Structure formats: structure tokens, C-alpha cells
Amino acid sequence: MKQNYQNVDLDVNPIENLPLNSIYQEAYPFWFGTQIARMDVSDFKVGNRVMNINSTRRLYIPFGARGTVVGNTEETLIVLFDDQFLQGTNIYGLCDNYRGAHMDPNNLINLSRNFSGF
């Protein structure tokens, strides 16, 4: 990899289009109208890269923290974050302390791309 590092050409879009519900906004129920689609647990898959956009509800998960979806419950996603943070968990002993969290899907942006044709 070291020898080929300079020759790697990443095909990255200069502009990324996001759905309206991915634009940062506080998630108070009375602010949501019919124009904003609510996210659901089924909108995410294990392995998706996500970013936290919640800065309320005293969850103490840093705004903009990135992680990977590693599981789900009926209403929340289980996310393993890249860095440790206060109030993080060890996801029932399956990861390092302070790196996991149960997240509401409405507080996450899915950074993974959908690939069709596979």
C-alpha cells in the first residue's frame, strides 16, 4: 500500500446532495411538519457510517461525532463511535469503554452511499 499510495485515485463527488431531513435542526416534535421525513431504524443497516447531529436532550454525545452502526433495537440504533466520549457505553462489554451509544435514528446522518446493481 505504501508504494501505491500516491497513485490511488479516489472518485469523490465535489458536491454531496443530502435529503431535507439531513439538514441540521433540533428535533423537537412540534417543529416537525409534513415536509420533513422522519428517519426509522429500518433506514440504516449494520456497517453504515453515521454522524451525530443532536445537540440536545443531554445525551452528551459530541455534535459531529462519527461512528458505525453495529446493531439496532426496535426504536434505537447501536452505534460504535470512532472516539471515546462522556456517557458512552461499552455496548454490553463488546467494545472499549465510552465508545458506544444507543441513538435515535432522527439524530443521525447516514454517511454511507447506497450502491445499486449489486
Image (cartoon, grey):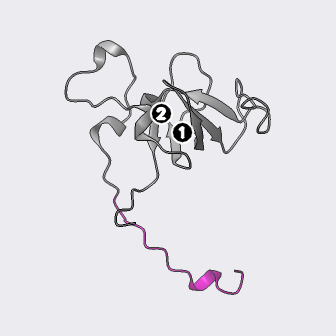
Quarter holding the C terminus?
bottom left
78 on left or right of 14: right
Rendering quarter of residue 26: top left
**Upstream in sequence: badge 1 or badge 2:** 2
Residue at 45% x, 41% y is 44
- In percent of width and height, residue 70 lies at 61, 42
Q: Residues within 10 Å of mark 2 (few under 14, many from 20)?
A: many
Residue named by callout 2: 53
Q: Which residues are magenta?
A: 1-15
Predominant secondary structure in magenta?
loop
Q: Which residue is mark 1?
A: 64
Picture coordinates of residue 53, whole percent (x, y): 47, 33
Image position of 102 (left or right of 96):
left
The alpha-carbon separation of the residues under discs 1 and 2 comes to 6 Å
Q: In the depicted view, which residue is nearer to us: 37 or 85?
A: 37
The amino acid marked with disc number 1 is: Gly
